[in-house]
């Protein structure tokens, strides 16, 4: 499986089309980026391109978490060819954001690769996650050409802790 990459934007003015059209804004989580997929009936997971399947390293408990979460097993039984992308939030990963204790040790899904070239529509990602009881990155909203003021009011917000790390745009 290929590792998905995303464009990092530090200043909105550097991407004038970022706020055009339909825009979804999610909470940016300060965890470990991880991908999860099924291969030959076994759930694999990776971070930074390293597949941890079959290794003695459990990657901060992610393997144990996946093994005990029936939603992932059921999802891959129904959709064996998709890849899940998200954040594995454990205290070890957090550098600058303080989350509520109940928010840790959870995988937060933020998108799904249908195949090597196609991402699932964001609304379908949240529907899929709900069906299989998989946590998602908090969605702050769906906006039609949000204003800079709207965006600024979301910066620093968090549904998982006191102060958020940032925001993510999907359009």
Image (cartoon, rainbow, N blue to C red):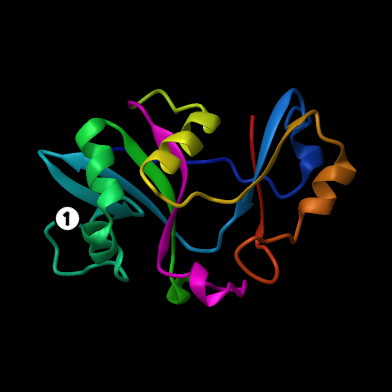
98 falls in the magenta region: yes
Along the viewing direction, whichever of 14 and 54 lies nearer the viewer: 54
**Can the viewer see residue 106?**
yes
x and y percentages locating residue 51 in the rendered image? 23, 53
Q: Which residues are magenta?
A: 94-115
Q: Number of numbered discs present?
A: 1
Residue 61: name its quadrant.
bottom left
Q: Is residue 80 visible?
A: no
Quarter of the figure that contains the N terminus? top left
Residue 24: percent from left, percent from top: 66, 36
Q: Left of 43 or right of it: where is 144?
A: right
CA neighbours of label 1 inside 10 A, class few (<14), some (14 to 19), many (20+): some
Disc 1 target residue? 53
Up/down of 118 relative to 128, above or below: above
Residue at point 20% right, 69% down? 57
Q: Is residue 133 above or below residue 164?
A: above
Which quadrant: the C terminus?
Answer: top right
Question: For residue 28, what is the image quadrant?
Answer: bottom right
**Residue at 45% in and 28% down:** 120
Give the structural element (helix, strand or loop) at label 1.
loop
Side (left or right) of 85 relative to 152? left
Most foreground residue, 22 or 11: 22
Image coordinates of residue 49 in percent, x first then y, are 31, 50
60 above or below 25? Answer: below
Residue 19 in magenta stretch: no
Q: Residue at x 45, y 42 (%)?
A: 130
Q: Name the one closer to the observer, 55 or 87.
A: 87
Drawn side of residue 138 relative to residue 72, left or right? right
């Amino acid at each position: 499986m290929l590792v998905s990459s995303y464009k990092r934007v530090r200043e909105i003015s550097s991407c004038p089309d970022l706020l055009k059209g339909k825009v979804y804004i999610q909470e940016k989580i300060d965890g470990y980026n991880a991908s999860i997929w099924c291969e030959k009936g076994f759930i694999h997971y990776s971070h930074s391109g390293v597949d941890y399947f079959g290794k003695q390293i459990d990657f901060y408990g992610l393997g144990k978490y996946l093994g005990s979460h029936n939603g992932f097993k059921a999802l891959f039984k129904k959709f064996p060819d998709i890849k899940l992308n998200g954040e594995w939030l454990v205290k070890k990963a957090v550098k600058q954001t303080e989350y509520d204790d109940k928010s840790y040790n959870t995988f937060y899904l933020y998108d799904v690769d249908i195949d090597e070239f196609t991402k699932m529509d964001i609304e379908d990602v949240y529907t899929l996650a709900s069906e299989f009881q998989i946590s998602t990155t908090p969605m702050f909203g769906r906006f039609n050409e949000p204003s800079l003021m709207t965006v600024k009011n979301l910066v620093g917000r968090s549904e998982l802790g006191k102060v958020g790390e940032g925001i993510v745009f999907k359009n």
